[in-house]
Image (cartoon, grey):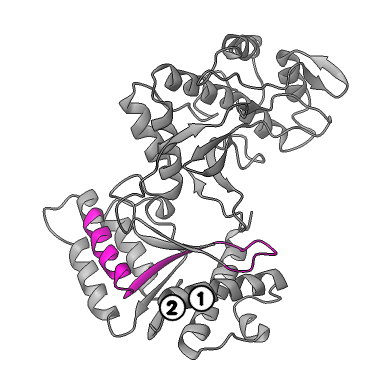
Amino acid sequence: MAGAIETKKQENGSRIVFESVIEKGKFPTTSFIEKVYPDVPAKWVDTYRLQSEALKKYLGNNKGYIYSRDEGIMPFIESLANKNMGVSKKDAWNPMDIIIVKRLGEKKIKAEIDKIAKTNGLAPKDKLIKLNLYMKVLLKEKVMIPISLKEIKAGVKEASIDESNVSAKSKVVKFKLIPNTLMCDLDITKPPLFDTGEFTFKMSVDDEIVKVQIRSFRYSKPSTVIQTDLTPLGRQSGAKLGKTASDAIKEFLGRVGLERPKSPTQDNMIAVDGKFTVGQIDFWDKFYKRIKDIKIEKQRVNWDAPFELGRQNVTFKRIIEYCLDNKDKDRNVLGRLFSKLVTLRHIKIYQSISQKKKFDEWLSVLYYGAKKEFSDTNGPFIKIY
């Protein structure tokens, strides 16, 4: 996963390449790209070429844009959304990485957005919805286009562009769990290396197959919350849909009388420092035994049992004890263990949703929550992937 500094270089590389291709009609030299991305890898030069070709095709003959990331209209909008519209996490509202805006329209657009943000008597959420409606019009007219960027997989010949939150949700025939794909990794097959500790399955969305992962994505920090990540299978680019927004998950679970599993720091059966009591260890052993045979949509979870600790077959309780005994040998041990434990809580939630006959709807929440298309508070953008 790229850090903030690397991401900034990658996205600014896209920004200056787009400007050169759209405004000047030529792909820039590597030395020009290196003004914002020193020692740019060849794979990113290839990505920029495919991204810019896709954007050029999308825009047609349109040009005369200003290309914004760290300066200009993008931080201007982000600041107002944060201060006046209740946006605390930008990507949960709009995962745009850069914005291009018509040079002749920028001043007027800024004034209109500022007016929306500072309207008296309008709640922050309503201001955000009004901003989104305005941005949809601008995107449709190709006057201002927020862009989400993805690295293009090696071997891909042509990048794709999708519009999100521009029109009504696409009509989906059905969401379905694909049989025999429910899996949870609880053992440790190659000690002292610790397995990830994740719950995975696949679902169909019309004729598309999507892999879902529920796990921690930062093992070095044991307190990290579990996230749900979706990746389409079979697409040449391999671009992720993204992580399902927590607001989408909370809203659905609230409607069906359930609560999202707590983070490791909030779960009273987890000692974040790794100093578990006998009672806490016994709780998780019994919790696993209690849920292991409960089906989800008539499907059993594949636990890959009997559990392995190297060449030994052991109980889940022994897995927990082994992790705790070795917690100081690797900074990722507790993060991986807690991922295993909290995913058990998630599996219990999945079982409850299935019992309530709401599972297909739940899959749709995961899907649209990852695409950031679950609410009127989600902003419009295009994704190049």
Dot 2 amino acid type = Tyr
- Dot placed on the residue nearer the N-terminal end, 2 or 1: 1
Residue, disc 1: 15
Query: Residue 215: horizontal and vertical position, in percent?
Result: 59, 35
The answer to which of 106 and 355 lies nearer the viewer is 355
Label of residue 34 in the image: none
Dot 1 amino acid type = Arg
Side of 333 where 181 appears, left or right: left
Label tally: 2
Please check the rendered image and state whether residue 139 is part of the magenta-colored stretch, yes or no: yes
Query: Residue 218: horizontal and vertical position, in percent?
Result: 62, 42
Q: Regarding mark 2 in the picture, which secondary structure is present there?
A: strand
Q: CA distance from mark 2 to mark 1?
A: 6 Å
Label 2 close to label 1 by CB (< 8 Å): yes
Side of 145 where 8 appears, left or right: right
Say which residue appears at 46% left-offset and 46% top-offset. Answer: 370
Q: Is residue 323 above or below residue 152?
A: above
Number of other residues with Cα within 10 Å of mark 2, as a class: few under 14, some 14 to 19, many 20 or more: many
Query: Residue 256: horizontal and vertical position, in percent?
Result: 34, 23
Residue, disc 2: 67
Looking at the figure, which quarter contains the C terminus? bottom right
The answer to which of 216 and 172 lies nearer the viewer is 172
Residue segment shown in magenta: 129-158
